[in-house]
C-alpha cells in the first residue's frame, strides 16, 4: 500500500513541477514557433503515457499485493493485450514523429527571398562573411588561410572580391528578413546554436551545412557552440544583433570587402616612428616597457594584436572601468591617434622592433623550482591558445606572453579575475580570458604560472636579448617560507 502511494505522489509532484517549473523555453525571437509546438506535443503524449503507466503500476502494486491466502495465476501470453499495446504504441510514436517531420521539411526548405550569410567557426572564435553586390559568395579553401587572408578566400575568384568580411564574434541581421546561414569550420567540429531563434546545426570540417530562420524581435542574442570542441569550448560565444533597416545599413557601411582588405596599404614605418615618439615616453625607445610608469613591453607583439587593443581603447571597450587606472590613461593616449591609418602606422612600427626578453637566473631546486614546476602544469590550459612557448597564435586571437614583464602579466590576470578587464560586451576575447583566468584559483597559482611564463623563449625568436639588469621584478623576488617556517626573500 505504501509503495503505491509513493508512486502516485511522485507522479503528482512531477506533473506539478512541469507546469510550475521556471526552467522553460526562452522567449522566442524567430518564426520557428512550430518547433515549440512539436516539443509541446511530445510533452503531452509522453506525459499522458507517464501518468498512465505509473498509475497502472500503482494499481497493480495495490491490487495484487501479497496475500498468503491467494496464489498468482500464470499467464505467459495474452494476444489481445499485445495487439492493443502495439496499436496504441504505434499511434503514439506516429503522433510524435509526424509533426517533427513536417517541421523538418520546412526547416530544410529555404524561402526564395532569404538573404545569405556565412558563419565560420574555429577554436574558439566566430567570424562571418556576407556576399557583396553580386549576391554570390566567393570560393574559399583552408590552404589559402593566412594572417592577411583569414577567411581563406580565393583572390583569383571574381565573386570573392566584393565579399564583406566580419572578423568579429558579432553579426548583425535585419528584422523580419529571412536569412540562410551557411556554416563551415576551420578546424574541428563546432555547433551553431541561438536558443531564442530555436535553430541549431553542426559545423563539420570539409562540409558546408546550413539552416534558416526569420528574426522577429529586435535585440542582441547570444550564440553558443554546443559541440565540445576543445579546452576552451565553453568560452566560444558570439552575438547576433537584430537591427532595424537604418541601424543595419549603418553597421554594414563600416565593414570591409575582401578586395579592400587585400588592397589596404601597409603601415608607414617612418610615420609610425614619429607617432611612437609620444608612446616612447612610457614604453621606452625600444618598446621594452617600464615598470615605474606601469607601461608593458610592446616589442614582440604582432601588429594585429596591437591594433585591436588600440581600437579597444579608442572605443572604450578597454580602459573604461573605474578601477582600471592605467587603462584609462591609455584610452586617453590612444585617442591622440586620429584615424585608422595612424593606428596602422604606429602598430606597424612597433611590430618591426626586435623582440626583447628578460631571462631570469636558472633555478635547479628548492621552493622556487617547485613553483615553476607547478606553473608549468597550470600553463597547460593557457598553451591551447597562447602556444606551448607562449609565442601567441593569430589563428586563436591569442597574443604573445613570452618575454612580457611579470608584474604586467600578474596585473592583467588579476584584472581579468576581478572583471576589471574583459567585461565589456564588445570584448569577446576578454570575456574568454575572464573565464580562463578563474581557473587559477588563488594568488599562488597566478605567481606560479607567471614564474613559468617568464622562463619561456619561443623557438621562432632567435633575436632575443638578455637583460643585464635584475631579472623580472615582482615575480623574480618573492617572499617564501622555508622548512622552518621562517620567511626570507629569494632572488631567482
Image (spheres, rainbow, N blue to C red):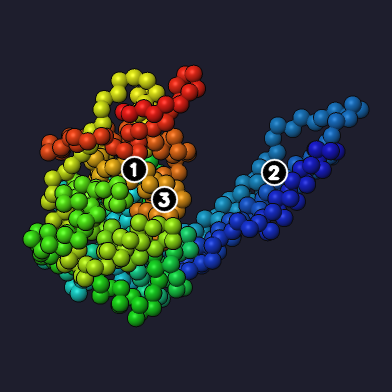
Residue holding disc 2: 81
Q: Quadrant of the C terminus?
A: top left
As drawn, is 483 to the left or to the right of 459?
A: right
Query: What is the distance, in whole Å, between disc 1 and disc 2 at their CAs?
Result: 77 Å
Question: N-terminal of the two: label 1 or label 2?
Answer: 2
Q: Residues within 10 Å of mark 1 (few under 14, many from 20)?
A: some
Nearer the observer, disc 2 or disc 3? 3
Q: Characterize the local packing of mark 3: few (<14), some (14-19) or many (20 or more) Cα atoms within 10 angstroms.
A: some
Q: Nearer the viewer, residue 256 or 201?
A: 256
Report x, y in % for residue 126: 32, 56
Say few, some or many: other residues with alpha carbon within 10 Å of mark 2 (under 14 / 14 to 19 / 20 or more): few
Residue 372 in view, yes or no: yes
Disc number placed over residue 407 in the picture, else none: 1
Q: Nearer the viewer, mark 3 or mark 1?
A: 1
Tell me the quadrant of the picture where the N terminus can be found: top right
Which residue in the protein does label 3 denote?
415
Amino acid at each position: 500500500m505504501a509503495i503505491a502511494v509513493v508512486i502516485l505522489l511522485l507522479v503528482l509532484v512531477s506533473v506539478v513541477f512541469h507546469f510550475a517549473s521556471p526552467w522553460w523555453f526562452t522567449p522566442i525571437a524567430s518564426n520557428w514557433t512550430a518547433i515549440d509546438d512539436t516539443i509541446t506535443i511530445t510533452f503531452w503524449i509522453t506525459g499522458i503515457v507517464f501518468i498512465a503507466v505509473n498509475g497502472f503500476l500503482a494499481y497493480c502494486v495495490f491490487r495484487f499485493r501479497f496475500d498468503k491466502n491467494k496464489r498468482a495465476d500464470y499467464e505467459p501470453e495474452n494476444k489481445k493485450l499485445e495487439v492493443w499495446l502495439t496499436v496504441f504504441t504505434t499511434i503514439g510514436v506516429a503522433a510524435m514523429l509526424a509533426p517533427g517531420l513536417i517541421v523538418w521539411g520546412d526547416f530544410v526548405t529555404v524561402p526564395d527571398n532569404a538573404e545569405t550569410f556565412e558563419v565560420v567557426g574555429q577554436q574558439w572564435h566566430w567570424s562571418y562573411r556576407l556576399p557583396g553586390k553580386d549576391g554570390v559568395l566567393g570560393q574559399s579553401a583552408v590552404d589559402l588561410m593566412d594572417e592577411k587572408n583569414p577567411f581563406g578566400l580565393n583572390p583569383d575568384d571574381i565573386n570573392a572580391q566584393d565579399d564583406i568580411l566580419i572578423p568579429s564574434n558579432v553579426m548583425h541581421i535585419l528584422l523580419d528578413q529571412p536569412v540562410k546561414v551557411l556554416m563551415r569550420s576551420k578546424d574541428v567540429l563546432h555547433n551553431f546554436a541561438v536558443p531564442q531563434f530555436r535553430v541549431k546545426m553542426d559545423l563539420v570540417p570539409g562540409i558546408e551545412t546550413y539552416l534558416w530562420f526569420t528574426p522577429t524581435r529586435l535585440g542582441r542574442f547570444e550564440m553558443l557552440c554546443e559541440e565540445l570542441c576543445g579546452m576552451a569550448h565553453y568560452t566560444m560565444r558570439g552575438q547576433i544583433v537584430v537591427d532595424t533597416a537604418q541601424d543595419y545599413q549603418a553597421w554594414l557601411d563600416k565593414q570591409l570587402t575582401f578586395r579592400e582588405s587585400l588592397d589596404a596599404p601597409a603601415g608607414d614605418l617612418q610615420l609610425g616612428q614619429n607617432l611612437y615618439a609620444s608612446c616612447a615616453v612610457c614604453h621606452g625607445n625600444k618598446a621594452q616597457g617600464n615598470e615605474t610608469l606601469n607601461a608593458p613591453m610592446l616589442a614582440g607583439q604582432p601588429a594585429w594584436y596591437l591594433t585591436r587593443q588600440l581600437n579597444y581603447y579608442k572605443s572604450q571597450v578597454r580602459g573604461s572601468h573605474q578601477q582600471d587606472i592605467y587603462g584609462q590613461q591609455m584610452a586617453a593616449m590612444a585617442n591622440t591617434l586620429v584615424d585608422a591609418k595612424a593606428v596602422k602606422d604606429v602598430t606597424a612600427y612597433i611590430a618591426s622592433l626586435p623582440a626583447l626578453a628578460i631571462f631570469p637566473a636558472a633555478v635547479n631546486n628548492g621552493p622556487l623550482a617547485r613553483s615553476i614546476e607547478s606553473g608549468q602544469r597550470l600553463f597547460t590550459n593557457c598553451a591551447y591558445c597562447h602556444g606551448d612557448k607562449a609565442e601567441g597564435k593569430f589563428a586563436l586571437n591569442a597574443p604573445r606572453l613570452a618575454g612580457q614583464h611579470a608584474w604586467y602579466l600578474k596585473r592583467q590576470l588579476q584584472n581579468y579575475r576581478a572583471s576589471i578587464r574583459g567585461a565589456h560586451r564588445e570584448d569577446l576575447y576578454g570575456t574568454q580570458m575572464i573565464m580562463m583566468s578563474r581557473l587559477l584559483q588563488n594568488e599562488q597559482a597566478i605567481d606560479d604560472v607567471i614564474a613559468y611564463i617568464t622562463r619561456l623563449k619561443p623557438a621562432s625568436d632567435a633575436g632575443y636579448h638578455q637583460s643585464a639588469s635584475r631579472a623580472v621584478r615582482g615575480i623574480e623576488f618573492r617572499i617564501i617560507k622555508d622548512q622552518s617556517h621562517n620567511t626570507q626573500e629569494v632572488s631567482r
